[in-house]
Image: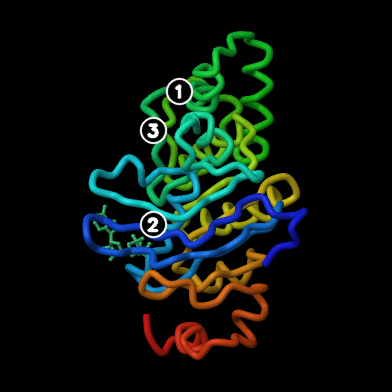
Amino acid sequence: MADDKNKIITASDVHLFYGRFEALKGITLDFAQKDITALIGPSGCGKSTFLRTLNRMNDLIPGVTITGNVMLHGENIYAPATDTVALRKEIGMVFQQPNPFPFSIYENVVYGLRLAGIRDRRVLDEAVETSLRQAVIWDEVKDKLNQSALSLSGGQQQRVCIARVLAVKPDVILLDEPTSALDPISSGQIENMLLELRDEYTIILVTHNMQQASRISDKTAFFLQGNLIEFADTKTIFLNPHEKETEDYISGRFG
Ligand SMILES: Nc1ncnc2c1ncn2[C@@H]1O[C@H](COP(=O)(O)OP(=O)(O)OP(=O)(O)O)[C@@H](O)[C@H]1O
């Protein structure tokens, strides 16, 4: 577990039910500042569900019941007073399928800033350039910022979506299989970008791709049937796992 002073998110005994089905069976897991943490495990083990508990995206699904605590900077995000819009700015999310809005590249990136009431063109222009540079797509799009984001390739769209998240300066970025819909070159670009972003952001990544987890993450959490089986340094998980189930999964014996 992370040192107390470095913890940014602390999840304690999180249970989640879809109706009567228990998809998370008491997950306790801490995330350290500016680590990349990979969540791995076979299909249906609950990794995406757990990721969504971290910025209350499951609240949007009817019939969901959640117990336990998720603390961000020591504050319970499930407290009734939590402003979920503000929470999702602090903990941004990127999905498997690139989901740009049907607007220009520029308007996609400034979307959250406009919602926050920022109108100063200079501030918006600066945020667009900074975020697109951080998402390593500035050079490809700088001459066509007014073109629809939907005209870009899938990999470019995903990087614009990441720029859209970065523009509101989150503390944490959640990514749910962000490269699984992309070709290997685009996936590699996104992996390199995540490694660059690690200096500034806490990154939590659901991935089916074990090479990806081992290439870019500092810590790895292995889930199985709604349980967290093992959480450790990525090297330990892949080279010297403590639990038999982890070893079986890593070595391809199931999943
Ligand atoms: N909206 C929902 N309603 C009901 N059950 C759901 C819902 N979303 C997920 N589940 C169930 O909860 C369990 C965990 O699903 P989840 O999507 O979190 O798994 P996962 O590990 O991310 O899987 P995958 O890698 O296939 O995306 C699965 O059994 C799934 O069928």
Residue located at (54% from left, 87% from top): 243
Judge whether residue 178 can be spotted in this image.
no
Residue 104 marker: 1
Which one is earlier in the sequence, the residue at label 3 or at label 1? 1
Q: Are marks 3 and 1 in contact (CB under 8 Å)?
A: no
> Which residue type does callout 1 highlight?
Ser
- Secondary structure beneath label 2: helix
Q: Position of residue 61 (x, y in %)?
A: 28, 44
Q: Relative to the observer, which residue lies in front, 68 or 126?
A: 68
Q: Residues within 10 Å of mark 1 (few under 14, many from 20)?
A: some
CA gap, disc 3 and disc 2:
28 Å
Q: Where is residue 18, by image quadrant? A: bottom left
Residue located at (62% from left, 37% from top): 170
Residue located at (44% from left, 58% from top): 50
Badge nearest the viewer, 2 or 1: 2
Seen in the image, is 146 located left or right of residue 64? Answer: right
- Tell me: is circle 2 under 8 Å from ligand 1: yes
Residue 150 marker: 3
- Secondary structure beneath label 3: helix
Above or below, comparing residue 228 to residue 206 in the picture: below
> Which residue type does callout 3 highlight?
Leu
